């Protein structure tokens, strides 16, 4: 019986946290921002923001996601973001439900270019 309570407690702790991350299934990138004033971080604005599932920490009205391009994964992500913006491709994008890279903007979890 104690085991069942422990499992239920873990599920109730994990599931709400997982469901709060933002996701947009099909949108376009409208703006990209970076520069020395932002410590080289890359900010992304979308044509369709994640209104229903927007991270509670995301208080910025323009920028939906941010990532660090100085890592090897960040460099790959930057290439995908620039390509999607240049070709006006639809993308699927999800956040981590935290705003640790830049206050008020959700950290990017993954980025996928969709078939048009």
Image (cartoon, rainbow, N blue to C red):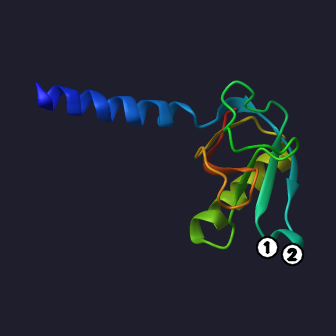
Q: Residue at x 66, y 38 (%)?
A: 55
Q: Quadrant of residue 75?
A: bottom right
Q: Secondary structure at mark 2?
A: helix
- Cβ–Cβ under 8 Å for marks 1 and 2: yes
Provide the residue designation for mark 1.
Answer: 39
Using a 10 Å C-alpha cutoff, classify the residue at mark 1 as few (fewer than 14 neighbours), some (14 to 19) or many (20 or more).
Answer: few
The image quadrant that residue 116 belongs to is: top right
Residue 73, x across and y down, in percent? 58, 64
Q: Mark 1: which secondary structure?
A: loop
Q: Is residue 40 above or below residue 44?
A: below
Q: Which mark is residue 36?
A: 2
Q: Position of residue 65 (x, y in %)?
A: 73, 48
99 shown above or below 13: below
Based on the displayed image, in which of its 4 quarters is residue 42 positioned? Answer: bottom right
Which residue: 64% across, 59% down?
A: 100
**Image height of 66 relative to 75, above or below:** above
Q: Residue furthest left?
A: 1
Q: Position of residue 17 (x, y in %)?
A: 49, 37
């Amino acid at each position: 019986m104690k085991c069942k309570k422990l499992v239920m407690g873990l599920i109730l702790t994990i599931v709400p946290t997982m469901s709060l991350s933002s996701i947009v299934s099909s949108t376009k990138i409208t703006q990209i921002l970076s520069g020395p004033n932002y410590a080289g971080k890359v900010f992304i604005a979308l044509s369709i923001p994640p209104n229903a599932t927007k991270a509670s920490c995301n208080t910025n009205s323009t920028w939906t996601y941010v990532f660090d391009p100085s890592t090897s994964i960040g460099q790959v992500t930057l290439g995908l973001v620039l390509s999607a913006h240049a070709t006006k491709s639809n993308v699927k994008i999800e956040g981590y439900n935290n705003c640790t890279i830049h206050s008020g903007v959700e950290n990017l979890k993954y980025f996928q270019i969709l078939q048009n």
